Amino acid sequence: MPSSQDQTPGPVDPSRRRRPTLTDVAAMAGVSVSTVSRALDGNPRIPGETRQKVVEAATALGFRRNISARSLRTQSSMLVGVVVPDIAIAFYATVLKAAQNVLEAAGYQVVVMNTERDAQHETVALRTLQDRQVDGLLVATSGGYVPDRGPVVFFDHVIPDTGLGYVSPDNAGGMTTLVEHLAVVHGHTRIAFLGVPPGPTDRTQRMENAPATERLEAFRNVMGARRLPVPPEYLAYGDHEWTEASAQQAIAELMRVAEPPTAVIAAGDTLALGALRQLRADQYKVGTDIALVSFDDPVSSDLLDPPMTALRRHDRELGEISARMLLDALEGRKSGVAPKTEHPTETRVPLDLIVRRSCGCAPETPESEPPP
Amino acid sequence: MPSSQDQTPGPVDPSRRRRPTLTDVAAMAGVSVSTVSRALDGNPRIPGETRQKVVEAATALGFRRNISARSLRTQSSMLVGVVVPDIAIAFYATVLKAAQNVLEAAGYQVVVMNTERDAQHETVALRTLQDRQVDGLLVATSGGYVPDRGPVVFFDHVIPDTGLGYVSPDNAGGMTTLVEHLAVVHGHTRIAFLGVPPGPTDRTQRMENAPATERLEAFRNVMGARRLPVPPEYLAYGDHEWTEASAQQAIAELMRVAEPPTAVIAAGDTLALGALRQLRADQYKVGTDIALVSFDDPVSSDLLDPPMTALRRHDRELGEISARMLLDALEGRKSGVAPKTEHPTETRVPLDLIVRRSCGCAPETPESEPPP
DNA sequence: CTGAAAGCGCTTACAG
DNA sequence: CTGAAAGCGCTTACAG
């Protein structure tokens, strides 16, 4: 049994001193480790007096429980893994933060992994998280998801029939809003779509239900329903990483077709930003010569030239919903509720159209929009 | 000894099956757990044949080591804690991502905590991280840092004489660049500073070396050195959270003073964005009526109206440097190198001036800037 | 109300 | 080259 005898005598660098353990506290309080553990738990079987002694000793020693040890014993790590394509993207960062808030309030900590939009990266990240014994997973997949034990909820990307469910933006509804604004309010008929290549890459599989694909499908459906043609040359694609640069190139080509569109819908904010940059470089007056709207709301979009009409996602809400869905399963499991074998829950978060100028509208109260 | 007898017979939900352990692999391979552990480590004492058997068994069972158990035993969690004020802010997200890249390459995982810019939150977060036995810490403090065991490096905020060191943007150099551009290139003499209140809040202590304070000091110094006056009314402050809204209010007031400035330096990107919004709302032509420059480069700043002249931080580099500094200590410690008691290392990352239009310049190649 | 003991899944001297 | 055993720091039935 290690005691202070092991300790080199004399002044010790405090930062290197061994952390006190339950055993240390027990010794100091003159009780057993079981009692310390229970007292610290607030177990009602321990009378106030004993608890008092224990708490004093613990405080005096600066004792803090070792969570690894506890989780080894309890088989619960109180860790939730979050995997995202790229934490530096505002959407993922916001979702993470929101999810983290609700998870931490319930006593869980979060470990994040970036996949860099690479399926293999993602598979490795998932494995690492499992090795850490995470209790649950929140994932925005890049196609590398492999099922394992433990509850998982997807956000952003839809994976049918897997995990507890998913919560995603209402891609279809959003696209409808966008097309209708362009077609009904502004009377456009030549509307192009700027997206990301559908179908898998070598690095990415199973993207059938990716946001990009859903948005493209929705675009086709709404256009069809409105009896508006979708010529193939009106389908422009950036790259799989949604880079601004790829959007610039795609839209430059798009505008060179025989009969160029009068309006374009960008399937994401980075795409919209790239399009805007290129259009401006090519001397188009966006909002006048050509309408441009964005599926996601870029940061500071009211300060852009021109201010961008866009769909605002409720990122925070999406994060909270996802986390809560996971939490429910976690708590349910803890209290012995049978693991649900019902269908995964599907939640769609609606999007709001923010009308600014790039669509051709002139907002009522120009320039005075409050900050996001 | 637990065996398959414990298992309820019949079909078992695979997601609920117990993860295989070393003992399982040992049983299957017909060797001891010690041998399995060593074989999996690639220990040279284990001959290829034995290793082969072990690896096969492990693969067949889908065995993965339990990291909690290992870290309990080895007293090393291979976990690095990162604490930031707000992960949804681009700077912190980018730094995190960069740091994570180098840390993961070395086998560490990262657990992030948001402090919401609250000192108490931060103290709790730090404690939680210690409870998780993190091997090291990367922190952008909000004033709630309390020293504990384990190596720590600060980024963003400077904390002298603590931890391994810090890596921060070159606030003084950056401010010099900004003032000189305004004063020398454009001949401004009435230059105002839009920052964040210096000194502590109730929720925040020890902010003497906060970025905001360093930038203000630098501003005063450079102005003084150039014999330019700094009247008190030219010092405008948003709030401690650097919100755009607070900047809007502050600059509105600033422009109402008897002799308003002809140029303003915003100490951060959100502040600059708020200022731009307000200035535009008040019908100023930014870049013509008044010059506005930003200490940090806002996202899409080339697409703003007008494009914003700003200092570009090398966020990724900053993250990598910080992580590497921590890693060096971690590796050193592991190989038994004495904990360094020398002075903390100070690293300053330089900033580049990106000249756009808001300062009054007309860039040579208008509108064709490549994406960030 | 309290304690002794087992055990979570590993690693690693120590002995053979 | 291999194994038995101790032990990392906890929690929790079990017994008193």
Image: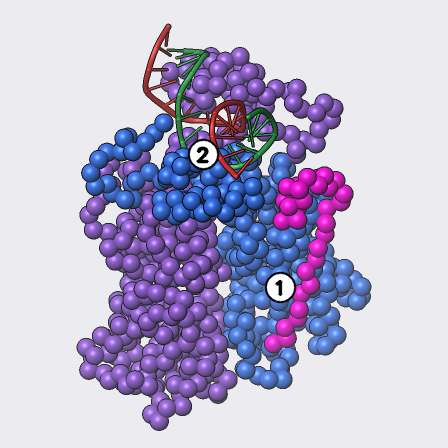
Chain colours: A blue, B purple, C red, D green
Q: Is residue B357 magenta?
A: no
* Disc number placed over residue B34 in the picture, else none: none
Q: Is residue A23 left or right of residue B168?
A: right
* Chain under numbered label 1: A
Provide residue A52's location: percent of width, then percent of height: 45, 47
Name the amino acid type tagged 2: Ser
Residue for badge 1: A313
Residues B306 and B253: in front is B253
Which circle's residue, 1 or 2, is located before the other in the chain?
Answer: 2
Asked whether the residues under marks 1 and 2 belong to the same chain, the reply is yes
Residue B124 in view in this figure: yes
Task: Between residue B31 and residue B75, name the one nearer to us.
Answer: B75
Q: Considering only vertical position in the picture, is A331 above or below B282?
A: above
In the displayed structure image, the side of residue B63 where residue B338 appears, left or right: left
On screen, residue B333 above or below A233: above
Could you say which is closer to the camera, residue A83 or residue B188?
A83
The magenta-colored residue range is A327-356
Q: Residue at x 36, y 80 (%)?
A: B236
Q: Residue at x 54, y 77 (%)?
A: A370
Name the mark on residue A32: 2
Position of residue C11 relative to residue A247, above or below, is above
Does A330 appear in magenta?
yes
